[in-house]
Amino acid sequence: MQIEHWNEAIDGEMSESAMRRKLEARGYDVSRYIYPPGTFFPPHEHAVDKIDGVLSGRFRMSMSGQSCILEAGDCLQVPKGVTHSAEVIGDQSVISLDAVKMGN
């Protein structure tokens, strides 16, 4: 699993606009979603490369037999065709930037 943690020394202060700019600069089309507590996405795959970026809350992602919990400032690369699942952990909604690779 390729997890990238926000690095203020390189990326500046973490904010929604800063994360959006960073993902768009890499050639991704970015959408914002809010997932309430209890949200679960069963195993599925996408036909495009994606990055899930977390702005707030805790998001458990499982992929390729591994699992991790993403928190504010974390991004996870989800390659096209790779089966994965996601679940909101705890009582706080997850605010997420869903980035889809353009031209994929």
Image: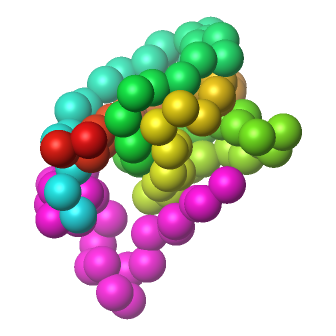
Q: Which residues are magenta?
A: 1-25
State the residue at coordinates (32%, 65%). Answer: 14
> How far across and how far down the image is residue 39, in percent?
57, 11
Whether 100 is drawn above or below 87: the answer is: below
> How far across and how far down the image is residue 104, in percent?
26, 41
Q: Tell me: 20 left or right of 14.
A: left
State the residue at coordinates (50%, 51%). Answer: 77
Q: Quadrant of the N terminus?
A: bottom right
Q: Is residue 6 magenta?
A: yes
State the residue at coordinates (73%, 46%). Answer: 68
Whether 71 is drawn above or below 89: the answer is: below
> How far across and how far down the image is residue 17, in percent?
16, 54
> How far across and how far down the image is residue 35, in percent?
44, 18
Between residue 75 and residue 46, name the one nearer to us: 46
Residue extending furthest toward the bottom: 9
Whether 70 is drawn above or below 27: the answer is: above
Residue extending furthest toward the right: 65
Which of the 4 image quadrants contains residue 86?
top right
Between residue 82 and residue 90, name the one nearer to us: 82
Q: Tell me: 96 left or right of 25.
A: right
State the residue at coordinates (72%, 35%). Answer: 62
- Number of marks in the rendered image: 0
Q: Can residue 34 be seen?
A: yes
Q: Can residue 88 be seen?
A: no
Between residue 12 and residue 41, name the one nearer to us: 41
